[in-house]
Amino acid sequence: IDIYHQGKEELAIIKRLDELCFSGMIILDDIYHPRPKFRRAMKRLWKSLLYQKYDLTKYGHHSGTGLILMNCDRHLTLQ
């Protein structure tokens, strides 16, 4: 999900996917957005998510890459 990083739109998409019983992976872009306003919003969003999640920033984009595993029984081992 790479949209206007205020957290509201991302959360609406994630909630809708859950309502539709989506099972799979979701990638969030810019979970550590460089602009403070967006960084705070994305931090709130990231902390609020109760799904299994992984911070993949060291493997992804410098401004933060987050992986959410929604409604699935997969687990990652990061090295």
Image (cartoon, helix red, strand yellow):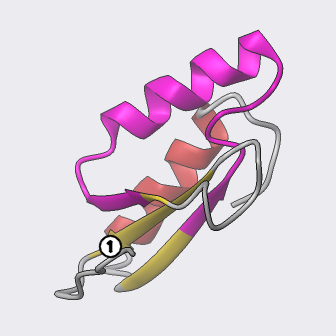
Residue lying farthest to the top in this orientation = 36
How far from the left and from the top, in percent, is residue 15?
41, 55
Q: Residue at x 76, y 56 (%)?
A: 61
Is 66 left or right of 79, judged from the image as shown?
Answer: right
Q: Residue at x 23, y 82 (%)?
A: 75
Which residue position is annotated with label 1? 70
Mark 1 lies on a secondary structure that is strand
How far from the left and from the top, in percent, is residue 48?
33, 34
Residue 29 within the magenta-colored segment of the rendering: yes
Q: Name which residue type carries label 1.
A: Met
Mark 1 residue crowding within 10 angstroms, few (<14) / some (14–19) / many (20+)? many
Q: Quadrant of the N terminus?
A: bottom right
Q: Residue at x 62, y 40 (%)?
A: 31
What is the span of residues highlighted in magenta in the rendered image? 27-54
Q: Quadrant of the C terminus?
A: bottom left
How far from the left and from the top, in percent, is residue 42?
59, 31
- Vertically, is 47 above or below 21? above
- Vertically, is 62 above or below 65? above
Quarter of the figure with residue 78: bottom left
Q: Residue at x 47, y 33 (%)?
A: 45
